[in-house]
Image (cartoon, coloured by chain):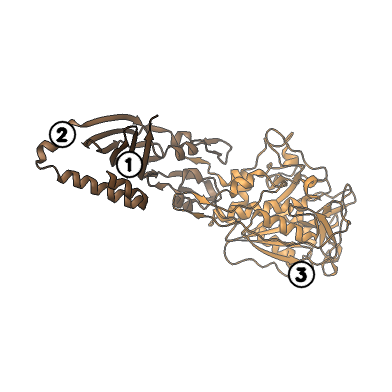
Amino acid sequence: MRRVTQFAFHGFRGLAVAAVFSLATDASAAADPIPALQDLLEGTRIMGIAEINPHDRRLAEARGGSYELSGGGLVTFDRWYQRLRPDLRLDGMSRLTDGSAILWGISTGELGSKYVVEPSIRLGLLVQTHPSPASTLSLTVTTALGGRLREKPCTADYGQIGGVQVVNCRLAASILEPKRTLDFLWRERMPDQTRVTLRYRLRF
Amino acid sequence: MTHLSRLSAFLLCTALTVPFILHSPAHASDAVLQFDAFNNGKGGGGGKKTTDSGDTGSTDGSGDTTLVLPTLQNWMSPEIMEAWKVGYFGQTTTITVIDDFSSSNRIRGDLGLGSTRLLHGEWTELQTSMIATEAQMRRQDFGDTRTVSLARSGLNVLNLSYGMMGQAGWNLNQINWSNREQSIINYATDGRAVVSKAAGNDSVAVGSANGSGSFDYLNAALIGTQSAIFVGALDRNGTTANKASLAWYSNYAGIDAKVQNQFLVVGVEGNKTNLYGTSFAAPIISGYASVLGSKFTSASPTHIVDRLLDTARTDTIQGYDVRLHGRGEASISRALAPAAIH
């Protein structure tokens, strides 16, 4: 554990390597894999189920948008970017040793009329030590796979001047050429895809 | 036959309270510019032509658009800023301003870039270019009566902030037009260019003689053509909460259904710019047409004109009356928007 805290000053990549190395060292110490697996399962805890969409901020902004149609009718974006199926995330932790654990999580993804958030999995490692009886130093490294936000296009009818075209729903009334609005459809990775957290707690 | 010598080109801008007419330069004795310049005659420095344009936009990979937007000036409708927020502004379009670029008649005004004195044509060109910031600008001076040439590709827009004035009573087929006016009329008739024509400042119906018996024969020649719009002036940019009224000087649509059908109004906020007159209404429509042409790149000039006319608003005008306001107040945001989306 002391080794890990020394790596802490080598930057994020160094931290991740140190953490993985630490895990490998601990795992190789287990002589019999079956009891080790049993220990792992016994030490597994569900940390919580939550409705969390990592793209929620962007979608919330979009829901506030609107524009007028050529005839004056108002189009509000909330119906396009309102969630129809929420993103449910299950987080858990499996203890490896007294001072380390695997963090894991899965999410169902989210669906709206004009967007999809793909399902995702999250894996990570937690190592912690007590430099003194009153203090705790912990390092968490997590990374996520999936969870991309993909925006779906709309079909817009511009009448005689532009016909019916596939467009970016948000930008259909902008000055952009309709087909060029498709360049601005969201294709976004999950924010904070890899996260490294170093935490020191002192009780007094 | 009436000869051109009987017609004069008048700029369409107005003085502080009394409209006046500036005769065009020597070569343009056949044309009359109609304009009204507020505070005309004050001293001041030369003008600065700006064709500053906004960035064409870029994406940072996250789907966001990063733009350097032009500045919304206080004389502009806020709608144009909505149109600018994303996109590029008038590429593939060409605006030709036929106006006074060579006389000594400078007018003091301020379009938000500082008070200065410019020629009438410099003002109308600047005004248009501040709306359609990426459009290719061309100018043809009144002294040049040759055929107006069009760009070979993209939408062509002609800005006419002048009228061809003469004593009323002649038939149009008696007019011996210069090549310049004849080409403009032909382009409007054939739908080859958007023609944005200042309606005039005599407070009469388009196609009628003014109080002194003068008549705008160019207006008359453009009535019923495919791609010409007559542009009148409102006293401000209207909103549903703060409706606008026809400016005191502006010509209006009248009872001719053809004129009503091709007549638009826009706010001319001379209290902010010192520039009054329908001379400064037409460039707004020229800019709007260019903006539309950059979005709908395959649309014909007639389509562009129809779009502006069809999407005009009447709910932003106090006491809307088709005989005064024609189709209503031009709305660039509605013109850009789809009729339906799902």
**Toward the viewer: B313 or B68?**
B68
User: Pointer 1: what residue?
Assistant: A139
Crowd rating for badge 2 (residues with CA inside 10 Å; few <14, some 14–19, many 20+): some
Classify residue A87 by image quadrant: top left
Residue B313 position within the rendered picture, expressed as x and y whole percent measured from the top left: 65, 39
Image-based side of B206 in relation to A46, left or right: right
Q: Colour of chain B?
A: orange
The amino acid type, in three-letter code, at marker 1 is Leu
Sequence order check, earlier mark of 1 and 2: 2
**In brown, which chain?**
A
Image-based side of B335 in relation to A122, left or right: right
Crowd rating for badge 3 (residues with CA inside 10 Å; few <14, some 14–19, many 20+): some
Residue B317 position within the rendered picture, expressed as x and y whole percent measured from the top left: 71, 37
User: Pointer 2: what residue?
Assistant: A39
User: Pointer 3: what residue?
Assistant: B144
- One can see residue B342 in this view: no
Residue located 28% across and 49% down the image: A18
The amino acid type, in three-letter code, at marker 2 is Asp
- One can see residue A161 in this view: yes
Q: On what subunit does the disc labeled 2 rest?
A: A
Q: Between marks 2 and 3, how big is the CA–CA gap? A: 94 Å
Residue located 64% across and 66% down the image: B150
- Nearer to us: label 1 or label 3: 1
Image-based side of B334 in relation to A20, left or right: right
Give the position of the C terminus of chain B as an image quadrant.
top left
Say whether marks 1 and 2 touch (CB < 8 Å).
no
Residue A28 position within the rendered picture, expressed as x and y whole percent measured from the top left: 15, 46
Q: Is there one chain holding both mark 2 and mark 3?
A: no
